[in-house]
Image (tube, grey):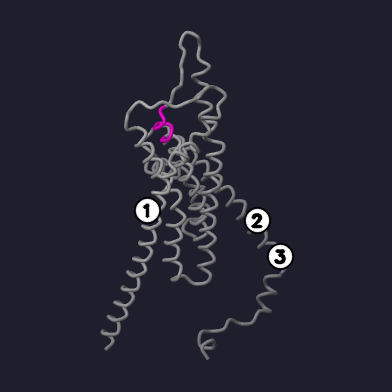
Amino acid sequence: LNYLYISYEFNFALETILGEVRIRSVWILIGLGLTWFTCYWFSEELIFLLALPFLTLPFDSYFVCTQLTEAFSTFVATSSIACSYFVFPLISYQIWCFLIPSCYGEQRTKYNRFFYLSGSCFFLFLFLTFSWVVPNVWHFLYFVGATSTNSLMIKLQPKIYDYIMLTVRILFISSVCSQVPVIVICLLELRGLSLETFTNNRRFLMVFSLFTAALFTPPDIWCQIVACFLISLIIELAIFVALIVQVREEGWTSGMRESGSIEKKNKSSPPPRTWQSNYQ
């Protein structure tokens, strides 16, 4: 009887999980399909939005097209990339809805905090990159050719596909770097790694930055160097902020112990209730 009951419970749980996965997968596929066709329908507007930092340069800036199929490939690539960014919140929400029912109240509060922190960092880095980094990058690249000597005149006429791909690479590097402080804070919060471990093993963090940049960035040496530098800088900033928070917490705890507030609180608090008393 026990074996049959355990087998029934296991089959019921497995069917429930598979049904939930099926529902979440259907919603994700529907969102992907509708978002991609919508992005392709407005692909020209999306390309104009991505090309706006370059078109605002003071000189007569324009793009060239060297292949007959370049316009179509540019539309498809722009639609796919924009679809991945637009559908990312939906995919995160569906995964969150699948995982959150198995968590307790305190775990939900903690994971909600990490979830909101991750989304805030993602959109903040994306906004700063598109509004400040991308215009400065193209301003530098354009004026390098415009300020050349008279012996070698360089006229910049970028291909539209190359421009879109470079802009997307910059945005992708920013998206990867935005999740580095969230990962560091999660490891420190969950006690997976201590602050002393981070500070004493900075050389391994450099290797981690190199591997992360090599795996999650396009196969371009300059993109990987920039991503490695940004990831290392963000890790150092996260360690610095965590160190300040730890010093403040230790100072607050030592001050409370010296004043005797913690001991008085422990003496005045009632003894913890056992599981048996709660059950009764």
Residue 251 lies in magenta, yes or no? no
On screen, residue 99 above or below 54:
below
At x 53% / y 69%, what residue is drawn?
Answer: 106
Q: Which residue is mark 3?
A: 258
Q: Which residue is mark 2?
A: 248
Residue 204 in which image quadrant? top left
Tag 3: residue type? Glu
| Mark 3–mark 2 distance (CA, rounded to whole Å) | 15 Å
Of residue 240 and residue 203, the one placed in the foreground of this image is: 240
At x 49% / y 51%, what residue is drawn?
Answer: 197
> Residue 100: image x %, image y %?
46, 67
> Which is more foreground, mark 1 or mark 2?
1
Of residue 4 and residue 84, the one placed in the foreground of this image is: 84
| Mark 1–mark 2 distance (CA, rounded to whole Å) | 49 Å
Q: What is the magenta range?
A: 159-165
Q: Main secondary structure of the magenta part?
A: helix
Ranked by sequence position, the earlier of labels 3 and 2 is 2
On screen, residue 218 above or below 10:
above
| Mark 1–mark 3 distance (CA, rounded to whole Å) | 62 Å
At x 50% / y 11%, what residue is drawn?
Answer: 149
Q: Which residue is mark 1?
A: 33
Ranked by sequence position, the earlier of labels 1 and 3 is 1
Tag 1: residue type? Gly
Ranked by sequence position, the earlier of labels 1 and 2 is 1
Residue 206 in which image quadrant? top left
